[in-house]
Every structure is written in C-alpha cells, then in structure tokens.
C-alpha cells in the first residue's frame, strides 16, 4: 500500500515534533479557518460529524462548539493530543483504512488527506465510509487535485528532507470515482484564494458529495 509510505512520514513527524502546526508541511499553509468556515455551511447544533485524518485538530477545534458531536480519527496520539478535550469530541487513534464506526453520521469530512492514498486505496476508503453516512448526509473532501492530469510525488523531498508520497489525482477523476460508488449531487468548490495553491499543476478544491 502506498499509504504506508505516508504513514511512515507522519509517524516520524509525530515522534519528533510537538507543535500544533506541525501537520502543515509548508510555511504559512494553515488555511484551516477557511476550511472550518466551509464546513460550517453544512452543519447545525444537532449535526454529528466523522472527521477522518483529524491531525492536530486545526479544523475540529474551530467547529466542535457548533455541532452535537465529532468523532475525530487520527492514528498518531502525539498529534491528537492537541485536539480540544470536550464532552462532544471522541478521539479514535486508528488509521482510516482500519477504522469502521458503528453508527452513521450527518457529515463525513476528509481534509488534506486523500492525496496520501493511491487510487485503489481512495476507492476503498470512499466505499468503506459510504454506509457510514445517513441518507442525505454529505461527504466533504478538501484536497489538492491535479489540474490537467494526475500528479505523482514518490521519492525524496528536498523540502521535507524525507521520503514522501502523494498522488494528486485529477479533479474529474475523483468526481467520477465518487459517482461510480453511488454518491450523488457531487459538486466541486474552489474555496481558497488563488495564491493558496503553490504549484501550477495542482489546485486546492473541496468536493461535496451526498448519499
């Protein structure tokens, strides 16, 4: 599995970096206020959210007091310790590919995570969590996507000073994957100012898909 490479990368980071912003790999790349504002358009005080890949809680910590409950899934406890301690937050230290909740949710969020999975793994994740959405519930993905084609990074990164894996699939491909699984009313949103996308071959988008 290609995701093992990404897990190894973040395992080393979690073991050596105790800062809340450590999961943001590029300087000045914390746009989680925009992420939170986008999610809040779809929630209310009775909403139950499953957040996959919660990291240090940069998004969860901004929205938890606006919803009923959040299950935050983050494999590394050293990241998850930064998530707010609240009665309406449940933290699960498990990988996305292994965790399977026992209840359904109004919203499932996956922010800045899906490029760490190859296409086969991505399909497995979208299929795995489809039953975990209530009918009419929404899957919200935010990610970098390839502008005109898939963009693969697999090798040593000078910027990160480490081996690094990421697959930035073409936006339309991701939409087609979701459609084939059964998600409907799939719509992409360009939620960031242009300067937030650092590379000309990838671009940040949010995708909202409904069950």
Image: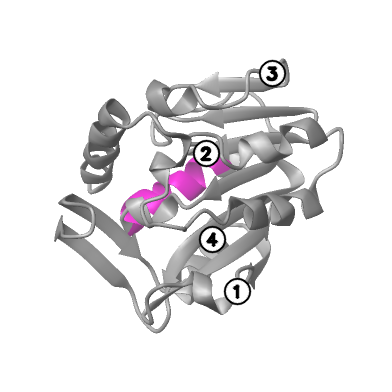
In this rendering, position of residue 85 left or right of residue 15: right
**Which residues, given as a range, are shown in magenta?**
119-129
Question: Pointer 2: what residue?
Answer: 52
Residue that appears at 58% across and 37% down: 51
In terms of depth relative to the viewer, which is nearer, 134 or 71? 71
Q: Is residue 132 visible?
A: no
Q: Distance between the Cα atoms at labels 4 and 1? A: 25 Å
Which quarter of the figure has residue 129? top right
The location of residue 124, given as percent across then percent down, is: 41, 46
Residue at the extreme top of the image, as rendered? 87
Q: Distance between the Cα atoms at labels 1 and 2? A: 24 Å
Frontmost of labels 4 and 3 is 3
The location of residue 73, given as percent across then percent down, is: 51, 30
Q: Distance between the Cα atoms at labels 4 and 3? A: 33 Å
Residue at the extreme right of the image, as rendered? 45
Q: Distance between the Cα atoms at labels 3 and 2? A: 18 Å
Disc marking residue 178: 4
Question: Pointer 3: what residue?
Answer: 86
> Sequence order check: which comes first, mark 4 or mark 1?
4
Which quarter of the figure has residue 149? bottom left
Q: Are marks 4 and 3 in contact (CB under 8 Å)?
A: no
Q: Distance between the Cα atoms at labels 1 and 3? A: 32 Å
Question: Pointer 1: what residue?
Answer: 193
């Amino acid at each position: 599995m290609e995701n093992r490479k990404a897990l190894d990368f973040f395992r080393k980071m979690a073991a050596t970096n105790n800062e809340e912003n450590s999961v943001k790999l590029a300087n000045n790349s914390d746009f989680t206020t925009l992420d939170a504002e986008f999610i809040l358009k779809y929630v209310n005080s009775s909403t139950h959210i499953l957040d996959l890949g919660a990291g240090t809680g940069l998004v969860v910590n901004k929205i938890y007091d606006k919803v009923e409950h959040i299950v935050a899934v983050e494999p590394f406890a050293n990241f998850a310790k930064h998530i707010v301690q609240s009665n309406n937050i449940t933290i699960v230290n498990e990988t996305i590919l292994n965790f399977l909740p026992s209840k359904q949710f109004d919203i499932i969020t996956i922010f800045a995570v899906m490029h760490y999975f190859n296409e086969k793994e991505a399909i497995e994740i979208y299929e795995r969590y489809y039953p975990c959405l209530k009918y009419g519930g929404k899957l919200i993905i935010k990610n970098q996507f390839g502008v005109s084609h898939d963009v693969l990074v697999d090798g040593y990164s000078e910027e990160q000073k480490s081996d690094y894996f990421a697959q930035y699939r073409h936006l339309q491909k991701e939409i087609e994957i979701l459609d084939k699984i059964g998600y409907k009313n799939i719509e992409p949103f360009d939620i960031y100012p242009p300067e937030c996308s650092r590379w000309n071959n990838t671009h940040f988008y949010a995708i909202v898909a409904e069950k």
